Image (tube, helix red, strand yellow):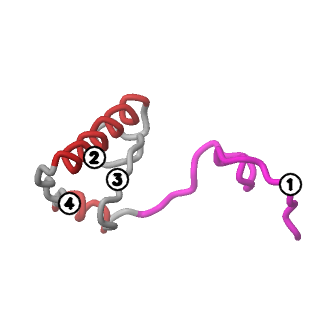
Amino acid sequence: PIPHFTMAGDWTSQKFLGSMEGAVLGGKLAAEVVANRALGNSEMPIKDIQQHIIDSASEFVSKEPIGVVGDGAIAFGAGASSVSKKE
């Protein structure tokens, strides 16, 4: 962890991962942390990772994405590049 560095977004550790609700909740939680620091309140401890999450992750096997056509960045939802792939 980086001291006094607070991040927010739909991908942060909260219950609505990858959604608009998650982005709003992530922002609210981050604002709460910043406000508590400004007021001099003690910080909440870093959340422990639950054991069943660790166990599930150790058994994870990655798979090829379904329905992806092509191998460029745009096929995975990222921006297009003006540089072509050399073969």
Mark closer to the chain start, 2 or 3: 3
- Per the image, the residue denoted by label 4 is 49
Identify the residue at horizontal 24%, vertical 46% (top origin): 33
Badge 1 local density, few (<14 within 10 Å), some, or many (20+)? few
Q: Between tags 2 and 3, which lies in front?
A: 2
Which residues fall within the magenta stretch?
A: 61-87
Based on the displayed image, in which of its 4 quarters is residue 49 positioned? Answer: bottom left
**Relative height, residue 68 to residue 56 (above, below):** above
Dot 4 lies on which element?
A: loop
Q: Could you say which disc has been placed on residue 6 in the image? A: 3
The quarter of the picture where the N terminus appears is bottom left
The residue pinned by badge 2 equals 34
Residue 70 is one of the magenta-drawn residues:
yes
Mark 3 residue element = loop
Q: Which residue is mark 1?
A: 82
Label 3 amino acid? Thr
Amino acid type of disc 4?
A: Ile
| Numbered tag placed on residue 28 in the rendering | none
